[in-house]
Image (cartoon, rainbow, N blue to C red):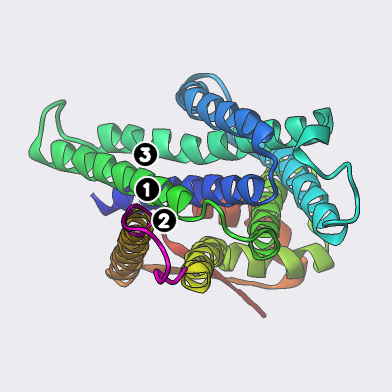
Amino acid sequence: MLKVLVPTLKSGLEVAFLLAMLYAYLDSTGRKSLFRPLKWGALLGMAAAPGLAYGVEVFLEREVVEGALSLVAAALALGLALWMGWGLATYGRVPSATDRKAGPLPWALIFLATLLLVALRGLEIALAPTRVFVEATGLISTELAATLGAAALALALAALVGTTLIKLVAGVGPKRVTLLAIVALLVLVVQQATTAVQMMLVRGVLPLTDWLFAIIVPLINSYEAFYYVLFAAACALALVAAWEWRRRKQPLDGLNPAQRRKLRAASRRTAGLLGTVGVLLALVGSALAACASDGRETIRFALAKPEAIPYMRDLVKEYNSSQDEVNVVLD
């Protein structure tokens, strides 16, 4: 069950964090016309994921598909981060950085980056039930039902976290949100670039030089850290929303009863969202920490640099085909 629960929850939460960050950025900077490419990119990415999963299981090579898409996704995420950085640097000084002047480049960046990033995470989610069916002893079994139920629960929890975050961050100030969104995108850039380089090493597209080996091995061994940085950015976004809500609280003195009721209702709604997000993030963090410490086996490869190339493909394939931690020890 954990073989499906953990990757499904992590992939679903990555999608939730990405969409919440992008929504908060567009809302805080007044670029609400760009909600449309964000929405359609996410929907089409989710719709494309089952087709990609079927393709890599039947007639496509996963290494080629995932490597190519990851490389393009990394480039798009980097372009989106640079665009956000330019907007932050010129905030309040350049008239073209307004909602009315949003041109085709931001539209295309948001749509394509969201589409590919969501599709890649959706591919992981869609492939998880395939492993369950392969390992199941029959079409109908208690283990299969429990595993698929856990996957559905993980997706529901990720969707709830994302929806609540999106509602909470509406109206947060632009500068802090932009910095957090840029950090999240840069993490995704490194993550997708690492995946692309892994696949190119597996296919023999890139030569495994000493300097590349020294860079890629720590990234492979630290792959889980990318998710936890995104998790930390989402927690920081919730804390920023809480801080700004407390800072904007208005005194009730001098207001008529209708205005007081309106402010109190808004305050209760925001407090409820903050409490819900806090509980959900704490629940997710506790669940993933418990799963991570649940007797995971460590695989170690002792490699000497001159002889590393023949073993690197096995290392990458082993890493991509299991949820175990892979450590490389250089002699």
User: Residues under labels 2 and 3: Cα distance?
Assistant: 11 Å
Q: What residue lies at 88% left-to-right and 41% top-to-bottom?
A: 96
Q: Is residue 64 visible?
A: no
The number of callouts visible is: 3
Give the residue type that dot 2 points to: Gln
In what element is the residue under mark 2?
Answer: loop
Give x and y (percent) for residue 105: 83, 33
Give the residue at mark 3: 128
Residue 162, position as x, y percentages in the image = 43, 48
If the image is split into quadrants, where does the C terminus sit? bottom right
Q: Position of residue 20 (x, y in %)?
A: 52, 49
In the image, which is nearer the foreground, mark 2 or mark 3? Answer: 3
Residue at the disc numbered 2: 323
Q: Residue at x 26, y 32 (%)?
A: 133
Does residue 111 appear to the left or right of 100 in the view shown? left
Task: Write down the quadrant of residue 260 in the picture.
Answer: bottom left
* N-term mark: 3 or 1: 3
Q: Secondary structure at mark 3?
A: helix
Residue drawn 55% across the image and 37% down it = 118
Q: Residue 308, image x and y in percent?
A: 70, 63
Q: Amino acid at mark 1?
A: Ala
- Relative to residue 237, is residue 100 depicted above or below? above
Q: What's drawn in magenta, residue-wise?
A: 250-261
Residue count near mark 2 (Cα–Cα under 10 Å), binned few <14, some 14–19, many ≥20: some
- Please name whichever residue, 99 or 53, is drawn nearer the observer in this view of the structure: 99
Local crowd at mark 3 within 10 Å, few (<14), some, or many (≥20)?
many
Residue for badge 1: 158
Q: Earlier in the sequence, mark 1 or mark 2?
A: 1
